[in-house]
Amino acid sequence: MDHCFDSILEIIQKLDGMGATYTKTLYIICLDTANLLIGTCQMEKKIANFINKLFKMGDKYLVENNNQPGSTEISRAYVNASFEAYRKKKEQRKQRETAPEGA
């Protein structure tokens, strides 16, 4: 799993190093990756930490994109919907962990 996370971060860092050209693409990569993990993985601490990192990076790219003159503004709706799905999945995990056995 660490190799996958490292590979994703490596790609993001390479695109990030190319300047403002890819801010919208980086935003989409971060949020799509976060959503893929939210939808398919159990919320283990390592995965939750990586998803948080993706949200922070995605937000950074959203702000950078929206501050660029002439760029198409990106809405926060995708971030908000993604974070809400993440929050609900984390809550479900906590409920399962605290539920009495046999319930």
Image: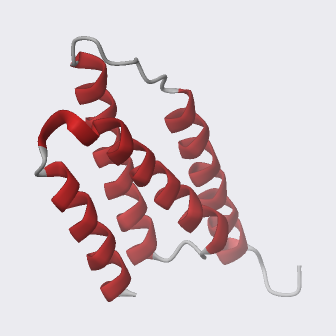
Q: Residue furthest right?
A: 103
For the N terminus, give its image quadrant. Answer: bottom left
- Answer left or right for 51 relative to 43: left
- Vertical relation: 63 (above or below) 48: above
The part of the image, by quadrant, that contains residue 36 is bottom right
- Answer left or right for 35 relative to 11: right
Q: Nearer the viewer, residue 52 or 93?
A: 52
Q: Nearer the viewer, residue 14 or 43?
A: 14
- Vertical relation: 12 (above or below) 65: below
State the residue at coordinates (17%, 50%): 16
The part of the image, by quadrant, that contains residue 71 is top left
State the residue at coordinates (57%, 53%): 86
Residue 7 horizontal/vertical position (percent): 29, 77
Residue 84 horizontal/vertical position (percent): 60, 42
Residue 63 horizontal/vertical position (percent): 28, 26
- Vertical relation: 79 (above or below) 31: above
State the residue at coordinates (56%, 56%): 35
For the C terminus, give its image quadrant. Answer: bottom right
Residue 40 horizontal/vertical position (percent): 65, 72
State the residue at coordinates (26%, 59%): 12
Q: What colour scheme has been applied to the protein in the rendered image?
A: secondary structure
Q: Residue furthest top?
A: 70
Numbered label tally:
0
Q: Nearer the viewer, residue 43 or 24?
A: 24
